[in-house]
Image (cartoon, rainbow, N blue to C red):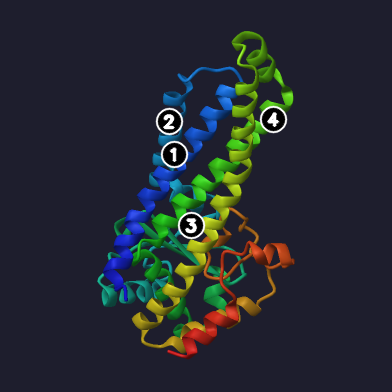
Amino acid sequence: MPNIYSQISANRNGTWLLMALFIILITGAAAAFAFGLGFGWEIIPFALIISGFIALISYYFSDSVVLSVSQAHEVKEDENPDLYHIVENLCIGDGLPMPKVYIIDDTAPNAFATGRDPKHASVVVTKGLLQKLDRLELEGVIGHELSHVKNYDIRLMAVVAVLVGLVALMADWFFRFTWYGAGMRRSNRDRGQGGIGVILLIIGVIMMIVAPIAAQFINLAISRKREYLADADGALLTRYPEGLARALEKISADTEPLEVANKATAHLYIVNPLKDHSSWLNRLFDTHPPIEKRIAALRAM
């Protein structure tokens, strides 16, 4: 059975593996598509450099983007000593560096963690979470988020989210370029590649259709698994699983939507913040496991 160290190692290695796979996927799709449109193989180094550069940018700056989009503002110890000391005490108990603490001015209760490693991490809670949970419940939520930090989930999920978005953006750009038809005409007229060019173009289009879907399912599988693990690790950290179980009940029962959340950041939160999107299709693509199963697992500990 894997222990905490093997889990951390798997997340570290998984981050680099996913980055490499996405770079290969993007480069391969771009090359097949471009070659079908009449460009030569010289496009491959260009596509490789661009995709690699964007992957590195996502690694170092994805947390800043998430914090900005979420309209979170940093708080110091003297501004909210109770919250600060809860985070500090749990970090001491788990041997973690003190992360930065942020608050979102929204009365919907929720929380998430972000960053690339424990030394560059941030824990974010909403004002509603502070208002609607008692101390033991709040400790359960913070313990859950610190488990994401300790296990390097924050790095893995941030990189996946950015690269999934990149694939979707490239797919949209390729489709627009195809419908304009300029590249196709150049391929048939200047290169004379005929059937080969068309076949490569079709391969590129198929790859760009399948890639965002496959990437999203990877994101879903990783997110759901990590939520269960963070629940368990957080409960062990606080030594009170009931606190987190009650917190999950309150957060999921709250009907107020979180205004700053969107589909790009929803997977980061402890509970899906998009409460007004409850169709069967959205449940299929939900990055969180069913809340009832999470609560049952906690109460069975």
Q: Amino acid at mark 4?
A: Arg
- Mark 4 or 3 closer to N-term? 3
Mark 2 nearby-residue class (10 Å; few <14, some 14–19, many ≥20): some
Disc 3 is placed on an element classified as strand
Residue corresponding to mark 4: 176
The nearer-to-camera label among 1 and 3 is 1
Image height check: is 95 above or below 62? below
| Alpha carbon distance from label 1 to label 3 | 33 Å
Q: Amino acid at mark 2?
A: Leu
Mark 1 nearby-residue class (10 Å; few <14, some 14–19, many ≥20): many
| Alpha carbon distance from label 4 to label 1 | 22 Å
State the image quarter where residue 143 is shown. Answer: bottom left
Mark 4 nearby-residue class (10 Å; few <14, some 14–19, many ≥20): few
- Counting from the top left corner in percent of width and height, residue 157 is at 46, 57
Residue corresponding to mark 3: 73
State the image quarter where residue 256 is shown. Answer: bottom right
- Mark 2 or 1 closer to N-term? 1
Question: Tags 4 and 1 in contact by the CB under 8 Å rule?
Answer: no
Quadrant including the C terminus: bottom left
| Alpha carbon distance from label 4 to label 3 | 38 Å
Disc 1 is placed on an element classified as helix
Question: Tags 2 and 1 in contact by the CB under 8 Å rule?
Answer: yes
Question: Tags 1 and 3 in contact by the CB under 8 Å rule?
Answer: no
Q: Amino acid at mark 1?
A: Ile
State the image quarter where residue 56 is shown. Answer: top left
- Which of the labelled discs sits on residue 23, or is there none? 1
Quadrant including the N terminus: bottom left
| Alpha carbon distance from label 2 to label 3 | 36 Å
Image height check: is 189 above or below 266? above
Residue corresponding to mark 2: 48
Q: How many marks?
A: 4
